[in-house]
Image (tube, grey):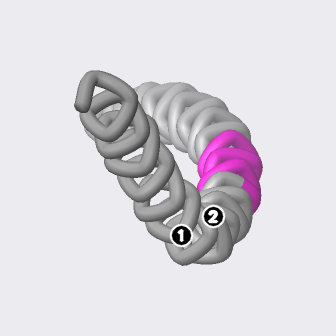
Amino acid sequence: MTGWIVLGVVLLGLLILLLAVRALAVRVPQLLAVQQDLQVTLEGAQALQARLEGTQERIAALQERVALAQHRQGILQERIALIKASFKR
């Protein structure tokens, strides 16, 4: 009688193990697909980050040009004021 109980427990354990292996066999391809999707997403994010860095560099260069243009505008306004003052004399 004890032998039958042991055999039943062993068979039940094997059945549970078989079901677990089948579940993993189904999940592994799904997990690989998710991993591939994540890899593509990561590559896309890295490309966007590179574009963002390039855009930030262009913005910094444009800000420098704006500052230079404003400086030149100030100089021109001073010259215009001097010219106007010389005509008033």
Taking the magenta stretch, the answer to whether it contains residue 51 is yes
Report the magenta stretch's main SS: helix
- Tell me residue 30's x, y (percent): 55, 74
For label 1, count other residues whose C-alpha is less than 10 Å away and answer few (under 14), some (14-19) or many (20+).
Answer: few
Q: Nearer the viewer, residue 46 or 26?
A: 26
Q: Secondary structure at mark 2?
A: helix
Q: Disc number at residue 22?
A: 1
Q: Nearer the viewer, residue 46 or 70?
A: 46
Amino acid type, residue under disc 1 in the picture: Arg
Q: Residue at x 66, y 75 (%)?
A: 29
Image quarter of the C terminus: top left
Going by the image, does 13 lie left or right of 73? left
Count of numbered circles in the view: 2
Visible residue check, residue 71: yes
Magenta highlight range: 43-55
Say whether disc 1 or disc 2 marks the residue closer to the N-terminus: 1
Disc 1 versus disc 2: distance between alpha carbons? Answer: 10 Å
Taking the magenta stretch, the answer to whether it contains residue 61 is no
Give the residue pinned by disc 2: 28
